[in-house]
Amino acid sequence: MSTAMIFVGLILSTILATASNSWLLAWLCLELNTLSILPFISKTKHPRAIEAATKYFLTQATASCLLLLAGTSNAWLTGTWDMTQMSNKLTSTTMLIALTMKMGTVPTHFWLPEVLQGSTLLTALLISTWQKIAPMSLLFIMSNNIQPTFTLTLGLLSTTFGGWGGMNQTQLRKMMAYSSIANMGWTVITLTHEPKASMINIFTYIILTTPTFLLMALTSTKTLQNMTTMWSTSPLATTTMTLLLLSTAGLPPLTGFLPKLIIMNELVTQNLTPLATMAMMTSLLSLSFYLRTTYLTTLLNPPSSATSATKWRQKMTKNKTMILLPTATTSTFMMPALIP
């Protein structure tokens, strides 16, 4: 009963934050959202989970302080808490830093890999997807008042560090965390020029990440070594996981390539071709560790190999596979209707 109430509070706080038009109400909803997710992170009675919950709380509290400072300063300068009245450069930049800290972009990204590694796979799914909706919605509202140079810099740094950080990871949760950082970079990089493209990118990422984490949870896959024996749990899940990872990497003609194509087109339209080229080059960093993971999943150990311990197939029931397969398949392949 208590878990259900906390989960309802998590959902309602996000909905109220996205629907609010006052910075004071948004700050209150984000605080409720933070307090609602903390029991899920610390539910596992392990020192690593408690450490992850502490790091998450301190980071989100710092971001909330910055958000309240920016909102209060803006209300003092303009006489209103309205989100659309962010004409002052200092307050809008401070608000951008606060919201990007909540999402986990460079340079305030260091908490995300450690928090995801200390959480369960389902909690990591919530942090990587649902917890980004409210801050991203607030950024979308104030996108007209954000400094373009600042967002372009944050976006390019996030795509670079996200790709670079994920290359040396053996833990899948940390790898997905750096993938999230890189994807947030693609979202922020075009926020001021084409906010709708940013929203397409973030929701495409959520659609792709959700079945990926669910497959990891159903097959008890947490490391790259587990990926090499994932075929013993479910060959169908192995194939689907490969397509999901390649799609998240942005490999055409899968779904993940679509938002990157839209963003690249927008950057070139805005005469930012050198920046678009640099962003495209940094995406190769993310592609490299995704290709390594898919290689370990599908090409390294054939089913006849007995070099490592394997899991029994009964771990993943037929009902779970049938429930998850339509979602994963639908989210993997490209949706032509969204192509500009």
Image (cartoon, rainbow, N blue to C red):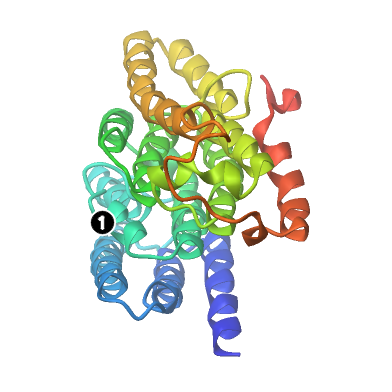
Task: Rate crowding at label 1 as few (under 14), some (14 to 19) or many (20 or more) other CA atoms within 10 Å.
Answer: some
**Nearer to us in this view, 275 or 110:** 110
| The N terminus sits in image quarter | bottom right
Q: Which residue is mark 1?
A: 111
Residue 30: quarter of image: bottom left
| The C terminus sits in image quarter | top right
Tell whether 221 sits left or right of 62: right
Residue 331: quarter of image: top right
Q: Position of residue 289 (x, y in %)?
A: 37, 30
Q: Decide if residue 176 is in sight here.
A: no
Q: Position of residue 49 (x, y in %)?
A: 32, 72
Residue at the image position 47 percent from the left and 65 percent from the top: 123
Picture layout, residue 121 above or below residue 48: above
Residue at the image position 63 percent from the left and 19 percent from the top: 253
Residue at the image position 49 percent from the left and 31 percent from the top: 294
The amino acid on which the numbered mark 1 sits, given as a three-letter code, is Trp
Picture layout, residue 279 above or below residue 286: above
Picture layout, residue 54 above or below residue 290: below
SS class of the residue under badge 1?
Answer: helix
**Nearer to us in this view, 107 or 295:** 295
Q: Position of residue 198 (x, y in %)?
A: 50, 35
Residue at the image position 54 percent from the left and 58 percent from the top: 217
Tell whether 190 sits left or right of 146: right
Q: Decide if residue 212 is in sight here.
A: yes
**Nearer to us in this view, 74 or 221:** 221
